[in-house]
Amino acid sequence: MNWQYLLYFKAVAEEQHYTKAAEKLFVSVSALSRAIGCLESELHVKLFAKSGRNVTLTKYGVVFLQYVLQATRAIDEGCKALDELSSNLSGTITISAFYTFSAVVLPNILRRFTYEHPDVSFNIYQDSSQKVMQNVLDNRVEIGFISDYFDEKNFPSLEFTPIMTEKMVLIVPPGHPLANKKSVSVADIANEQFIGFDHTSNLSLHLDRIFKQEGYHYQIKMMLSDDYAIAGMVRTGMGIALIPSGQPVVSREGLAEIQLEGSLAQRTIYATWKKDSFSSYAVTEFQNSLRSMRMPEL
């Protein structure tokens, strides 16, 4: 099958007009028409139907176009990969990360990488951990950063690399009865009313798991989407909260911070990406740098 004919087919499908497609391709209309005719003869189906001065895809053309688009994207990516391999490490890496990680940890990771690879750039999108994982699965981004509470067996197409762990700490107003304690158990706080994370955050699932392990129910008085708003509500005495300790951007002013006891009183942050999808040289190098990181605990 002639590769040029596939490009001609793609152009006609996009323009829905032979003359416009021919101008785009810098070929004559007759040459373009002959190429499409040869392609249709080889496939034994009609790919286009006339619609006035325009043409539209037949049902066969609609199906075939999806495969042609996949093929042309793959060839473009292959050319890009060879270009990167034959030159200095460069290119753009697309990343999706949950909000607080983007503010606190990710800047240092990118700073270290770009110090060694200054020609690499990044497009970064912020979302909840659940949506970040979906972005990776849907190929919207190349690398995601997510918090734990997921079953790896349910995502066989993804690789998960641990990046860091964070302890969970209790925050309470200074006048709270627990404010002077250095640490608390789940039993100590089981009857408290919590300002919690909403269900877009993996932390809501993680905190449920902490309490269920000890045989208690996590009592939510109010749900919010981020650490900053939760800390603000605790500061005014609306309730208490459990948040990750490694969030220096969340002001501790007007709050008492207490360590939470127990084996689940921490969360793990992972980098994730598709195992078998095409990765540019820049993405592969960044993945390798993430695999080699020493996992800190905050």
Image: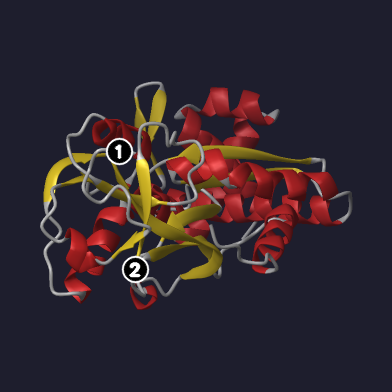
Dividing the picture into quarters, in which one does residue 183 lie? bottom left
Helix, strand or loop for disc 2: loop
**Which residue is outermost to the right?**
87
**Marking on residue 53:** none
- Circle 1 crowding by C-alpha within 10 Å: few under 14, some 14–19, many from 20: some
Residue 112 in picture, x, y percent from top left:
75, 49
Separation of residues labelled 1 and 2 (CA atoms):
20 Å
Residue 217 shown left or right of residue 244 in the figure: left
Dividing the picture into quarters, in which one does residue 208 lie? bottom left
**In the image, is residue 103 above or below residue 38?**
above
Residue 71 in picture, x, y percent from top left:
57, 56
Q: Quadrant of the N terminus?
A: bottom right
Residue visible at 66% across and 52% down in the picture:
77
Tell me if I can see residue 179 in this picture: yes
Q: Say what amino acid the circle numbered 1 marks.
A: Pro
Residue 197 in picture, x, y percent from top left:
26, 46
Q: Which residue is identified by label 1?
A: 174
**In the image, is residue 7 above or below residue 156?**
above
Tell me if I can see residue 9 in this picture: no
Residue visible at 23% across and 45% down in the picture:
240
Helix, strand or loop for disc 1: loop
Residue 189 in picture, x, y percent from top left:
19, 59
The type of colouring in the image is secondary structure
Q: Which residue is identified by label 2?
A: 261
Residue visible at 61% across and 66% down in the picture:
295
Q: Nearer the viewer, residue 199 or 10?
A: 199
Callout 1–callout 2 Cβ contact below 8 Å? no
Residue visible at 81% across and 40% down in the picture:
119
How many marks on residues?
A: 2
Ranked by sequence position, the earlier of labels 1 and 2 is 1
